[in-house]
Amino acid sequence: MRRLAALFFILGTLLVGYSFLPNSRNAQPLIKNIFVKNVDTVTAGAPLPAAGSPQLSQSALPMEVKNNIIDPIQLRYSQLTDCLNSVDEPCQGFAGETFREYYQDVLTTMHLEAKALLEDLKQHADMRLPQYESFARTLLEDSHADMQMVGLEIVSLYPPSLENLSAVSRSLETTIESQYLSRGLKLLENYKGLSSYNSELNRILNTQISTGLDEATSRLATKALFKNLNEKRYHEFSILRDELKANLKSSLGHISKNSQNLLKGRLQNLDSILSEYASLNR
Amino acid sequence: LEEIVKASRRRIEGIFVIYICLILSFADVSHAEIFKGISRVEAPRSCGSSAGPLRGIFTIGTIGPTCSARGFGNALLANIHYDDFIVDESKISFQGGSRSLSDSANRHIVNYGVQITNLMDQMAYDFLKTRGVLEKNTRKGATISDAELKAWQLFIKVIAYQESLFTHYQLDAKSSDEDMRLRIMVGDQEFAKSCVKSKETGATQCKKRLDSKGRPIPKLDAYGNPIYQSRGMFQIMSSQESALAKKNFDLVNNIQNGMSHIYSHWRQIVRDAPESSALRAQFAKCRHQIHTSKGVNYEAAIRAAYGMYNGGPMQICRFANSDAKNAAYEKNSPGCKVDKLTYKSDAQKKSCEAKQRCGYYACPWVNDMRIKRLVVAPTWESRLKIKDSARAEKYKNKSTKQFEFNFDISCLLQGRNFCLRNQNLQQAAEDFMAGRTDDKLFELKSSDENGVLAATNYCVYEKNKKSFTCTQQEKLVPCLQNYHSFKLESVVQKRKVISAYYRVHELPFDINNFQVENINDPYTLCKGQKDGVFTPGEFVQALKPIIVYESKNLKSKQLFNLAVGAKIQILDLNIDAYEGEIRWYKVSGLGPNNTHVEGYFFAGDDYSWSEFLTPTPSISLADQVIPVAGDYLRMKNETFVFIGEEAWRMTPGAYFMQNQSLPAGAIIKVLEIKMVGYEQNILVKFEYSKGVIGYVKIGQLKTANDEVRKSINQVIEIIPKWPEIKTFSGVGFGAFGGIL
C-alpha cells in the first residue's frame, strides 16, 4: 500500500514537472541562454522545430533527459543536439537558407552558450552546482572537439572525482586533437590521488601511442609517458614496444615507405624514452 | 625650512618629469624615438579579403575565391614544398573576354588536379595501410583487403570532388613580393561566395551574413565572421578562432586531419563497431545493407560514412532514407532526376531543380544521391583527366609503384617543417638561405617539451658561419645587429616618419636544420654593440638626478631617487620593443619604508644616453646584487652543480641529470657570470675541483615576483674576501671551495 502511495506521489511530481516543460513550439523563446541562467526553473524554451515537424515533447525526449527531467541544461543541450540532427526539418530561429549555414548556426549557438556558462562558472564559484559538472561530462562526449574543450575547462573547475576522471579519460583516449590531449593530460595531473588514476592514464597513453589516429597526439602521449614512467609502466610499455616492433617487421613487405617511416617514428619515440628511462634509473 | 626644501624638490622633480616628456614629445623625430617594436601581422584567420576568379562549384580542377595566406601559417613553407599544388593565377586567362578558360589555363588547372589527386591517393593508401598495422590486434581480419583499400581511396577522392575547396593554395597575380603572393582557400565556401558577391557590387567589406528574414546573424567573431567554419579542404566543422584548426594550413597535415576524422567514422562502419549505444541503435536500421552475406558492401559503407561526415554521427543511415526520398521524388515528379542535364523545357528544369533544393543549395538527400552516383559511376574522373590508370602509368615510380613528390610526406606528418626530398638537407637549407640573408631579422620556432607550443627565437643569419644567432628575449632584439645588420623600416607620410619597426621574416625550417646559437645573456648580446647600453651586473654612476619608478612608465609610482654621483648596479636592461632604443634600466635601492625595492629608470636614447650615466669600476658591497667575476660567494643551501666547461649550454630539462652538489656554507670564487635561457637564469662559473669547471644557478633575472635581489639572496651571499679557514673539517672542496 505504501509502495503504491509512493508511486502515485512520484507520478504526481513528474506530471507537475512536465506541466512546466516548454512542450509546445508556440512557447516561442525565450531566455537567451539557459545554460547559464535559471538553473532551478524550467521556463525557458529552445528554438523549437518548425511547423509540421516533430515536436520536442516529453515523449520525444531521449531517455537521459526523461530521467533528469528537471535539468534544463541537459534539456537545452539535448534540444540543440536534436536540432543539429534535424537537417530535413530544421528548428526555427536559426539561419536556414542552406543546410551548412543552419548547421553552423546551431553549432555556434551551442558553442557560445557553453562558453558563456564556462565564463560564469569561472567567475562565480557559488554557481558551480552539480548539474553543471554533469553537463560538462556530457560535453566531453560531444563529437565536436571545441565543445569537448569547453567541457574539459568546466570539469577543471570542480574537485577531482572518479566520475570526472573516467569521462575525461574516455575523451582523451580517442581524441585526434593534440591541443585537447595536451590540456586534458595537464588536468589529469590533479587526479593523481584517485584510485583509478594510474589505470586510466595507462589506457589513454597506451591507446594513443599504439593506435592513436593522429601522429601529433601519439607523439604527445609518448612524451607524457616519459614524465610518468615508473618500473611498472616501463615494463608494460616495453611489451607494447615489442608488439609494435613485431608488427612493423611482419608488415615491411606490404606497406609503403611513408607508412614504414610513420610506424618507425612511433616506435623510435617510444623506444628512446624507454631507453632514456632505463639509463637514468636502472 | 625642511618643508620648503621638500616643496622645492617636488617642484624640481615635477619640472624634470615635464622636461623628459617635452624631450620625448618635441625632439627631432628620429627612428629611435618612434620605434614601434617588432612588426607582426595580426591578420584575422578569415577570408575577409577574398579575391580571385570564381567558377561555379569548387571541385577538383576548378578555382574559387581565395584570401591572403598571411595570418594562417608559414607561406614560405607552403611555397617551398607545394610548388606543384599551387594554382598560379597569372597563368589563368579567359578566351576573348568570355568566362571560358583558355587551353593553356585549362592545362594548368588539369595538371593541378592531377597532382593533388596523386597526393590524396598516396596519402589515403599510406593512411589505411598504417592503420592496418597499428590495428592488427584489434581489427577483424589481419590485413586490409584490396577491396577496402580501393573503396577508401575512392571515398577520399569523392569527398574531395563533391565539396572540398580544392584550390588550396593560389598565387596572387598582382603582388610582386614573392613571400606575399600566396593565397589560401579556407573556411566556409558560402561565406566566401557571399563575400565575393558583395565585392562585385562594389562593397569594400564582406557582407555580414543575414538570416532568412534579412536580420544580421549575431553569432560572429571579432572580425565579423561566423564562429564555426569548416577547416580547409575537408570541411570539418571547427570554431574559426579555435586553436584546434590552426594546424590545417599545411596541405599534407590538412589532408591527414580530414582523413583522420573520416576514418573515425569509417572504422565504426566497416568493423561493425559503433562507439556508443545510441549510434548502435541508429546503425541497426541500415547495418544489413553494409554487412551482407557476401561480405562488406563498400558502396553502402561509403554512403554511410559520408552521412556521418556530412551531417554528424547520427546520420549514419541517412543514405537509406535518401534513397526512399529520391524514389518518391522521381515518382511524384515525372521527368525529374538528380543532376539531370537535359530537360524538355526550362520550366520543367526549374521545377525539377526547385524540388531538390533546401534553401539555395541542394538538400542532404540530394547530396547523398550525388555521392552514390560518384561512387557507382566514376566517369567524372575521366572528365577531369584524373583517371586512376592514366595517372598511375604516368606518375607512379615504376619500382616502388607509389606516387612520389619533391617532399617527404612522413616527415611533414611527423611535425617537421623542412621536408624537401634532398640528399643533403643541410646543403639545401644553406642554398635556400644564400639569397635571403641581407638585412633581415628572422623568426624560428622551437617546440616546448610537449612538442605543442612553440617558443619564438629572433634570429639573424651569419652567412660566413652558415649559422643563426638568436635570442628569445624580444627586448634584446636590437642587440642582434651586433651579429648581422637588419633594417629598421619606417612608414613615412608627408615627409614625416610616423612609425618605425623591425619586420620579422618567417622561414620554412625547424630550428634544428641549422646550427643555432641562442643568446639570452644581455651582457654577451649587447655589450659593445651600442654605445651607452649597460648590461646586467655593470656598475654605473648617475650624471644627473634620476628618479626610479615602479614600472617603465614616467607616470608610475616613484620609488626612490639617485642623486648626481650615486653609484648603482644595473640589474636588467630594456631596449623594449615598445620603447625602441630608448633605455630603461632596472635597479635595486632603498624604498620609502627603508626596505629594498626594485624599479626602473629612464636613461635616454641613442642620442642622449651620455647625459644620464657613466660606467664606474666598483660600488659598495651593500649595494651590489649580482656578483661579478672575482667575487667570493657563500652558498646558503645545498646547491646543484653542473659539471663541464659547456654545461651552461644544457637545456633546463637536462639539469636533473647532474648529481653533483655544493653543500651549504661552501665558498666559491666567481670566474664568470652567464645568463641562460628564456628565464635568464644566472649561472656562476667556478672551478669545482682542480681543472674541472662547474656552474651553479644562483638566481634569475626573470622572476615570478620580479625581484632579482630576492632570487639571488635565497641562494648566495657575496662576501668581501676569501675567509680565513679556521678548521679542516669538511674541507677539500675543490681548489677554491671550502667550508667554514
Image (cartoon, rainbow, N blue to C red):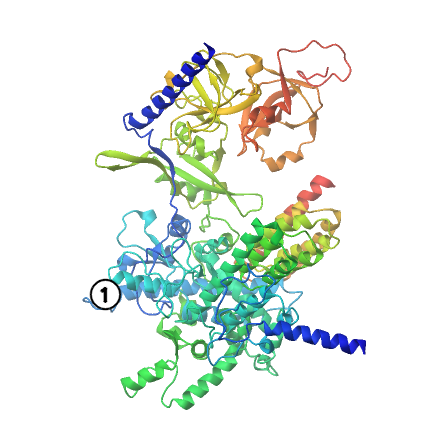
State the residue position of label 1. B94
What percent of the width, then of the height, locates residue B433?
39, 40
User: Which residue is drawn at the image coordinates 73% and 40% (left, top)?
Assistant: A281
What percent of the width, then of the height, locates residue B230?
44, 62
What percent of the width, then of the height, locates residue A75?
58, 68
- Vertical placement of residue B78 versus B392, above or below: above
Q: How many numbered discs?
A: 1
Choose between B298 and B421: the one closer to the eye: B298
- Vertical placement of residue B45 versus B729, above or below: below
Q: Report whether A118 appears left or right of A188.
A: left
User: Which residue is drawn at the image coordinates 47% and 18% (left, top)?
Assistant: B561
Q: Residues within 10 Å of mark 1 (few under 14, many from 20)?
A: some
Which quadrant of the figure contains the N terminus of chain B?
Answer: top left
Which quadrant of the figure contains the C terminus of chain B?
Answer: top right
Q: Report whether B191 appears left or right of A26.
A: left
Which of the 4 image quadrants contains residue B692?
top right
Question: Chain ID for label 1?
Answer: B
- Vertical placement of residue A213 versus B277, above or below: above
- Vertical placement of residue A230 versus A165, above or below: above
Q: Report whether B431 appears left or right of A276.
A: left
What percent of the width, then of the height, locates residue B477?
42, 32
User: Which residue is drawn at the image coordinates 57% and 80% (left, top)?
Assistant: B286
The residue lying furthest to the left in this view is: B96
Which of the 4 image quadrants contains residue A92?
bottom left
Residue B408 appears in the picture as rendered: no
Q: Report whether A232 appears left or right of B482.
A: right
| Residue type of the residue flagged with mark 1 | Phe
Choose between B83 and A39: the one closer to the eye: A39
Residue B623 appears in the picture as rendered: yes
What kind of element bears circle 1?
loop
